[in-house]
Image (cartoon, rainbow, N blue to C red):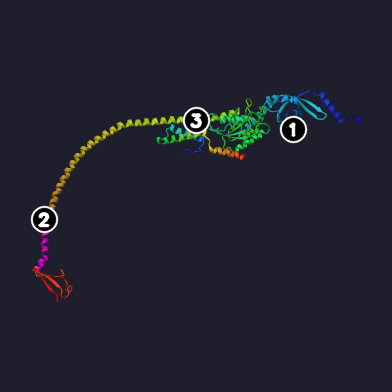
């Protein structure tokens, strides 16, 4: 359900959306649990983007350095 | 005529003395520096020009000199006041004396300089560039780009060895929160005549990787304070305005804003300040995540409480409803019970009457069948007696057996066989002939 490569902004927008749905009471209790789970996964993803090293990005940077040599 | 002819030296010496005697000792003059060289002994040799009001064509040109003893004082005076290196391309106001030398020809000797003129000229020129960028409709373009929520992939334009670059990297990597940034340096010359082209070339290289990076950072620092002129170029400003990524500047100066600063997405004073700005974006994102987490916790607990209350309300409503339903059901049941009993009684009574009637009919029926049966048996018994073999023998018939089997055909017996004949009165054994 949670895409690994989702950008920070996309994730935040999704979380905001879920929050709004809950606030307006659009969500059924059954769906609520699922959505809350999804949102907490996204929050975790956002946090990790602040702190963790993404291999893919480091690889691209390395390639850029190599190209210049 | 020969004795009236002057030697070249005599002529030039006469011109020199006329110039000296008939001209004031010095003038203030405004001109543009088109060439500037400093030789090994510290003398400064220049070429001053004046261009046509409209266009690039030169209408006046002269050599000029600043002797090293003067230049040693004028250069720092000029550069600290204007924060610009004395270099070709600048417009200056200088005090000059006209010099004519028999061997070196005509030149101006510069004895003083008025930096405020150059400052005013530069301000004017800056304003012209700003007006031009506005007229082109690009001045605000970079400012109007949204800054990514998480500007983590940073393209830096700086000289590799600049102290400012070191400060920037240090501030970013040791940010105290453990935030992760990805920095790629695009080295450029950050001062002098090459700077403009070099910075634009770096921007072009970043442009090739535009979708990878989040922001561009232009930093400088630790170099000569008098080296900001390249950041006032129209060409560079135009590139920054139209660059597809937000450009942050930390050019490292306090007072004057360069055009580069004015058109950048965000202008910061020093490289360190740029790093702090980026870290701050992360902190805001971090706080936003925490807020969202809390909001979720709150809203979910409210939701759960609401659902619980709703459930309780239902439960309260359910009890009396069930009781009522039960009472009405049990009344029904009682009524039905009574009803069922009497109906059943009636039903049984009616059925039992029916049954006894049927029983009588069945009894009579059976009686009839038995009588009839008995009669039939009598007849049959009688009929049967006609067929009794014994009675038949009595009437004179006999049965012949051969090997204990009744004979029906004489062919069944050959000669000299013993046959038995059964009569009513007994058995005769005889031999066939």
Local secondary structure at mark 3: helix
Q: CA distance from mark 3 to mark 1?
A: 61 Å
Q: Nearer the viewer, residue B119 or A48?
A: A48
Quadrant where the N terminus of chain B lies? top right
Residue A29 horizontal/vertical position (percent): 40, 35
Q: Is residue B407 above or below residue B83?
A: below
Residue located beneath label 2 in the image: B371
Q: Which residues are magenta?
A: B368-393
In reply to whether residue B378 is colored magenta, the answer given is yes
Whether residue B47 is visible, yes or no, is no
Alpha carbon of mark 3 to alpha carbon of mark 2: how far? 111 Å
- Mark 3 = which residue? B288
The label nearer to you, 1 versus 2, is: 2
Task: Find out whether the residues at labels 1 and 2 contact each other: C-beta distance under 8 Å.
Answer: no
Q: CA separation, marks 1 and 2?
A: 161 Å
Q: Badge 1 is on which residue?
A: B58
Indicate the quadrant containing the C terminus of chain B: top left, top right, bottom left or bottom right: bottom left
């Amino acid at each position: 359900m949670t895409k690994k490569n989702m950008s920070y902004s996309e994730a935040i927008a999704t979380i905001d959306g879920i929050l709004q749905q809950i606030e307006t009471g659009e969500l059924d209790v059954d769906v609520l649990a699922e959505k809350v789970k999804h949102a907490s996964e996204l929050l975790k993803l956002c946090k990790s983007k602040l702190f963790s090293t993404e291999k893919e990005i480091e690889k691209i940077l390395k390639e850029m350095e190599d190209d210049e040599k | 005529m020969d004795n009236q002819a002057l030697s070249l030296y005599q002529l030039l010496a006469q011109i020199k003395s006329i110039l000296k005697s008939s001209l004031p000792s010095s003038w203030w003059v405004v001109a543009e520096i088109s060439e500037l060289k400093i030789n090994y002994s510290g003398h400064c040799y220049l070429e001053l020009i004046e261009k046509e009001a409209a266009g690039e064509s030169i209408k006046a040109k002269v050599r000029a000199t600043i002797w090293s003893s003067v230049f040693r004082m004028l250069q720092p005076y000029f550069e600290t006041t204007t924060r610009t290196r004395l270099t070709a391309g600048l417009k200056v106001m200088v005090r000059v004396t006209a010099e004519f030398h028999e061997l070196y020809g005509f030149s101006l000797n510069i004895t003083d300089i008025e930096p405020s003129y150059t400052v005013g000229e530069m301000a004017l020129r800056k304003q012209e560039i700003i007006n031009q960028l506005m007229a082109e409709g690009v001045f605000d373009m970079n400012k109007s780009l949204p800054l990514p929520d998480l500007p983590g992939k940073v393209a830096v334009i700086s000289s590799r060895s600049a102290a400012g670059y070191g400060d920037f990297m240090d501030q970013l990597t040791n940010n105290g929160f453990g935030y992760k940034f990805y920095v790629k340096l695009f080295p450029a010359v950050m001062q002098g005549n090459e700077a403009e082209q070099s910075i634009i070339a770096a921007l072009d290289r970043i442009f090739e990787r535009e979708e990878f990076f989040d922001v561009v950072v232009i930093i400088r620092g630790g170099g000569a304070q008098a080296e900001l002129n390249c950041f006032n170029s129209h060409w560079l400003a135009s590139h920054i305005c139209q660059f597809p990524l937000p450009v942050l500047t930390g050019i490292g100066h306090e007072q004057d804003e360069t055009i580069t600063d004015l058109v950048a997405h965000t202008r910061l004073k020093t490289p360190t300040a740029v790093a702090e700005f980026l870290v701050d974006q992360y902190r805001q994102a971090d706080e936003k995540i925490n807020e969202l987490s809390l909001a979720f916790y709150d809203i979910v607990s409210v939701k759960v409480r609401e659902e619980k209350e709703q459930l309780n309300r239902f439960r309260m409503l359910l009890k009396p409803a069930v009781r009522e339903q039960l009472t009405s059901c049990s009344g029904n049941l009682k009524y039905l019970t009574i009803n069922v009993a009497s109906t059943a009684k009636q039903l049984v009574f009616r059925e039992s009457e029916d049954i006894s009637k049927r029983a009588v009919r069945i009894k009579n029926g059976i009686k009839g069948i038995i009588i009839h049966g008995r009669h039939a048996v009598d007849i049959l018994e009688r009929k049967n007696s006609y067929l009794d073999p014994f009675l038949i023998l009595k009437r004179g018939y006999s049965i012949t057996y051969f090997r204990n089997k009744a004979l029906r055909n004489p062919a069944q017996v050959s000669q000299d066989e013993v046959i038995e004949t059964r009569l009513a009165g007994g058995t005769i054994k005889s031999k066939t002939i």
